[in-house]
Amino acid sequence: MAEQGTGVIVGEDGLARAPWGHHDPLLRAYYDTEWGMPVQGEAALFERVSLEAFQSGLSWLIILRKRPTFRAAFDGFDPDVVAAYDESDVERLMADPGIVRNRRKVDATIANARATVALRDDGGLEQLVWSFKPDRTPRPTVLEEVPTTSPESLALSKELKRRGFSFVGPTTMFALMEAVGIVDTHLVGSHRRGASGVWPA
């Protein structure tokens, strides 16, 4: 393993990654195949919004390990199904040790599903989220240069809150934008830089 001046770490496989995507096998697989790739479609984006909300205050690795259980517990994050949840579903979720049992986040996910359904009359969640794609993306060379918010994530946060969403603060929304390819914050020199096709390397 060798360190490079760009801040990336070159692994035994010869591939350069950001430090957070290097050591843990699950994070490495996520980094190499998912993170930063374009995510579109209502259900897929609703899942990402939901998981980013659950991640708030926790590590993403915790959420990634629990993601299969989250998907089962929330019926594949089908917005129509989740929007129809009642108190018995909340009790079921709060009793499920396979997810993050935070009542405020569970309630927010159900409310966000209802807000997602309501958005269909005005273009839908996908159109709204992607409408905040900036004109340019960061080009960090070390992790310290990766922003945690942006004017666009702040604006997206405000608009989602106006539409009835919660747990969608500017930092959480910037993490969403990174994860779904709206911005590319792969470190310059990473083998994943530019992989999304949305932004040049």
Image: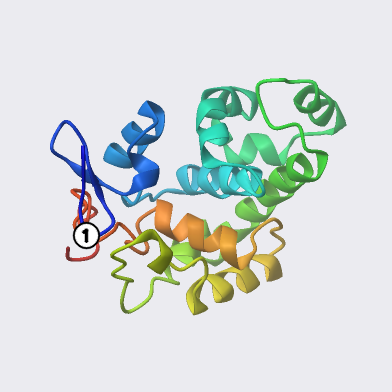
Where does the image place residue 194, in percent across and percent down from the top left?
A: 20, 58
**Res 90 quadrant in image:** top right
Where does the image place residue 164, in percent across and percent down from the top left?
A: 72, 62
Amino acid at circle 1: Gly
In this rendered view, identify the residue nearer to me: 198 or 163: 198
Q: Is residue 134 left or right of residue 118?
A: left
**Res 78 quadrant in image:** top right
Q: Is residue 178 above or below residue 150?
A: above
The residue drawn where x is 24% and y is 54% is: 196
The residue drawn where x is 65% and y is 49% is: 56
Where does the image place residue 102, in percent across and percent down from the top left?
A: 78, 38
Which colour assignment does the render follow? rainbow
Q: State the residue lying farthest toward the left.
A: 14
Q: Is residue 49 above or below residue 23?
A: below
Q: Is residue 1 left or right of residue 87?
A: left
* Location of mark 1 (residue): 5
Q: Quadrant of the C terminus?
A: bottom left
